[in-house]
Amino acid sequence: MTLKAVLFDFNGVIIKDEAIHQQLIEAILIEENLRPSPQEYREICLGRSDRVCLTDILKRRGRVVTDSYLDQIITRKAEAYQRQLETLEKLPIYPGVEDLIFQIRVAQLPMGVVSGALRCEVELVLSRAQLAQYFTVIVAGDDIKVSKPEPDGYLLAVEQLNQQYPELKADASECLAIEDTFAGIEAAKRAGMQVVGVANTYPFHMLQRQASWTVDYLNELELDRVQQVYSGTTHQPSRI
C-alpha cells in the first residue's frame, strides 16, 4: 500500500478562524433572543458544519426551525464571515501550511479539502491566500447532507479524486487526513483513513489518543516518514 493523496480539514487546520465563527454564531443566537454559551459552542460546533451546529444549539433551547429559515441564517452568517475577512489585512493562515503543501507537491500527491464550511468560504480563503491552485478537490458543507463525524465528506473526496485522476485508483485507506478536532478525526477514521492530528484546537495529549500521528505544528510533519509507514518499511510512531 502507498500513500496516494492528502486531504486537509479547513477551519483549524488551514485558517485560524474559529474565534470568528464563534463570534458569528453567538451574534445569531443574540438575534434569536437566546443567550450564547462559549462552552456549548466548543461542545457542539467544533469540527461540525454550521447547519448541524445551529440546528443542535437551537434544538437545545427548544427551537425547531424550518430548513428555509435555517438557510437564511446560514447565508447571513456566511456574508458576515466574508465581511470580517475583508477587514483583515492578512488572513490568519496557520504556520506550516505552505511548508507542508510544498512537501506534498514534491511527492506529487494530489490534495483536497474536506470541510463543514461553505464552499464560498473555502474558495474565498484559498484564493486570497494563493493556495487554490494546489487543491484539486473541495468537499464543503453544502455538498453533503451530513456533517463530521460522519465519513461521507471524506468518502466523496476520494471518489472525486479518482474521477479527476483515473490513474490514481485510490482507496480511502491510501489517503491521509489532516484534522484538528475529535469530530474530524472520527470522520476520517470511519472512512478508513489514517489521520494526522494537529494541536491547533485541542492539546497534543488529547489528540494523541485519537489520531494516527500527532503534531504540535504542521511543519513538524515529516511526509517521507508517513509514506514509509504506508509502504510498510517502518513502524508507525504516534508522534512524527
Image (tube, rainbow, N blue to C red):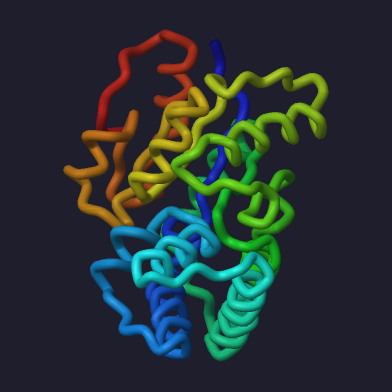
Left/right of residue 72 with respect to residue 150 in the rendered view: right
* Residue 221 in the image: above or below residue 55: above
Q: Is residue 77 left or right of residue 40?
A: right
Instruction: Kindly indicate the quadrant of the structure image that contains residue 136.
Output: top right
For the residue pair 167 and 33, the one nearer the viewer reads as 33
Q: Position of residue 37 (x, y in %)?
A: 27, 76
Q: Is residue 86 above or below residue 213?
A: below
Quadrant into which the N terminus falls: top right
Q: Position of residue 170 (x, y in %)?
A: 66, 21
Q: Is residue 128 visible?
A: yes
Picture residue at 42% right of the left edge, 82% below the top = 29
For this rendering, which residue is in front, 68 or 98?
68
* Numbered marks: total: 0
Q: Residue at x 65, y 70 (%)?
A: 71
Depth check: give the residue in front, 43 or 66: 66
Image vertical order of residue 56 relative to residue 4, above or below: below
Q: Quadrant of residue 156?
A: top right
Image location of residue 77, percent across then percent down: 57, 79
Q: Is residue 19 above or below residue 132?
A: below
Counting from the top left corner in percent of width and height, residue 106 is at: 61, 36
Q: Quadrant of the C terminus?
A: top left
Question: Which residue corresponds to the image point at 64% horizontal and 65% vertical from the top-left?
Answer: 67
